Amino acid sequence: MEIVILAVVIALVAIGAISGLVVSSRKKKQLPPQAPPAAPTITAPPAEPHVGDEAETPREEPRRTIEEVDLPTADEAVETPVAIEDPVVAEAPAPAVEIPEPTAGRLVRLRARLARSQNSLGKGLLTLLSREHLDEDTWEEIEDTLLTADVGVAPTQELVERLRERVKVLGTRTPEQLRTLLREELLLLVGTEFDRAVKTESGLETPAVVMVVGVNGTGKTTTTGKLARVLVADGRSVVLGAADTFRAAAADQLQTWGERVGARTVRGPEAGDPASVAFDSVKEGIAEGADVVLIDTAGRLHTKTGLMDELGKVKRVVEKHGPLDEVLLVLDATTGQNGLVQARVFAEVVDITGIVLTKLDGTAKGGIVVAVQRELGVPVKLVGLGEGPDDLAPFEPEAFVDALIGD
C-alpha cells in the first residue's frame, strides 16, 4: 500500500515539473510590448538653397499634420465636376465681320493722298508751260518730265506735239487756260472711252469668276483680299479661291481677308494642284449661290512655259463650270518699265481684261497708267493707294488727272 502511495506522489511531482518547464518556455517566447505609434509627420520640400553671403541658418518651420488639412466633405466630393476651359487650347472667337467703306467716289476721297505723290508731274508740266518763251529746250524738258513719269516714248511724243499746236493757237496763256489745256490733253492720253467696271455678273445661273494674276511681290494676294472688300461694299457675295498653293502662308493671308468681310475661302494642301483649288472654289460658289468667285493664282515667272501651263490649266478647269468673266493683272506701279515686261509675259499666257496698279501712292510715276494701257490695250480698272484695307479704289480718269495737276 505504501508502495502505491509513493508511486502516486512521484508521478505528481513529475507532472508538476513538466508543467513548470512548459510555462517557462512559453514565457521566453513572448514578444516585448510594442511602443505606441508616433504622430505622422509631413515633410515640406526643401527651400531653394542660398549660397555665399546669402546663406541662411536653417530654422524650424511650422508643419501641418494630415488631420489639420481641410478635405472636401462627402457631398462636395460627389458633385458634378466643373470643366475649366484652358485659355491656350480654347478655340479663338470668330472675328467680327467688318463693313467696308463704300466704293462710290472712293478715289475722289483719296485724291489728296494721290495728289501728294503725283502732282510733281502735273506741277512740273504747268511750270514749264507757264514760261514766257517756250523754246526747244523747254519742250525737251517737258518731254523729259513725261518720260521720267513712265508715260512712255510714243505717248510722250503725241502729247508734246498736241501741246505745241494748242499753245501756238492759244497765244497768250493764263494759268487757268494752261491748267484746262493740260487737263484735256492728259485725259485724252489716259482715255475715257474704256469700260473700267470689274465684271461681277456672269449673266448665267453661275457666279461671275474673276481670276487674279501677277508676279509675287506686287501685292497680288493682298489685292485679291481688298477686291473682296470692294465687291462686298457694293453688295456682292464673294467666295475666295486660294489657288496660290506654292507660296507659304498665301492661303492663310487670303483667308484672313475673307473672314473680315464674311467671305468663305476655299483652299487646298500646300504645294497642291492650283487647278483643283480653282475648280472647288467655283463649285463652292455655285453651291452657296455667291455672286462672285475670286481666284488668287500663283505668281511665279521663272519660266514662261511653266506659267503658261499652270494658268492655262486653271483657266480650262474653271471654264468647265462656265466662262471666265475677268482676268485682272496686278502690277506694281513703282516698277515702271519692268512692270511692262511682266505685263507682256502674262498677256501672252492669258487674255488680260483689266489691270490693277498697286502702290500708286508711293511714286510720282503716274504715267505708268498710260504706258500699260497702250502696251496691253486693256484699261486700268483698279488702283491701290495705300496700305489700308479700303485703299483699293475703282480707277476714275477724271479724278486721277485732277490729282496729277493739283489744285
Image (cartoon, helix red, strand yellow):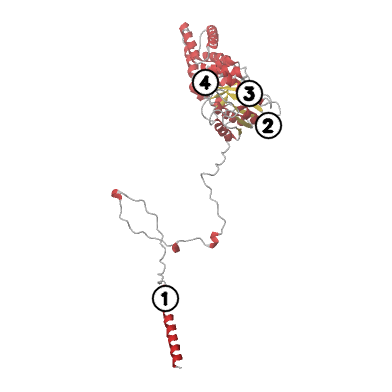
Residue 162 tag number: none
Marks 2/3: CA–CA distance: 20 Å
Residue 286 tag number: 2
Q: Which residue of the protein is positioned furthest toward the left in this rendering?
A: 53
Mark 4 / mark 1, whichever is N-terminal: 1
Q: Secondary structure at mark 4?
A: helix
Select label 2 or label 3 by which is in front.
Answer: 3
Q: Is residue 407 visible in this depiction of the protein?
A: no
Q: Residues within 10 Å of mark 4 (few under 14, many from 20)?
A: many
Mark 4 / mark 3, whichever is N-terminal: 3
Occupied quadrant, residue 341:
top right
Mark 2 / mark 1, whichever is N-terminal: 1
Marks 4/3: CA–CA distance: 28 Å
Image label count: 4
Marks 4/1: CA–CA distance: 114 Å
Amino acid type at circle 1 is Ser
Marks 2/1: CA–CA distance: 103 Å
User: Where is residue 372 shown, x and y percent of the image?
Assistant: 56, 17
Amino acid type at circle 4 is Ala
Select label 1 or label 3 by which is in front.
Answer: 1
Q: Which residue is mark 1?
A: 25
Q: Is residue 83 visible in this depiction of the protein?
A: yes
User: Where is residue 69 shown, x and y percent of the image?
Assistant: 45, 61
- Relative to 88, is 376 above or below? above
Marks 1/3: CA–CA distance: 106 Å
Q: Secondary structure at mark 1?
A: helix
Residue 313 tag number: 3
Occupied quadrant, residue 63:
bottom left
Mark 1 / mark 3, whichever is N-terminal: 1
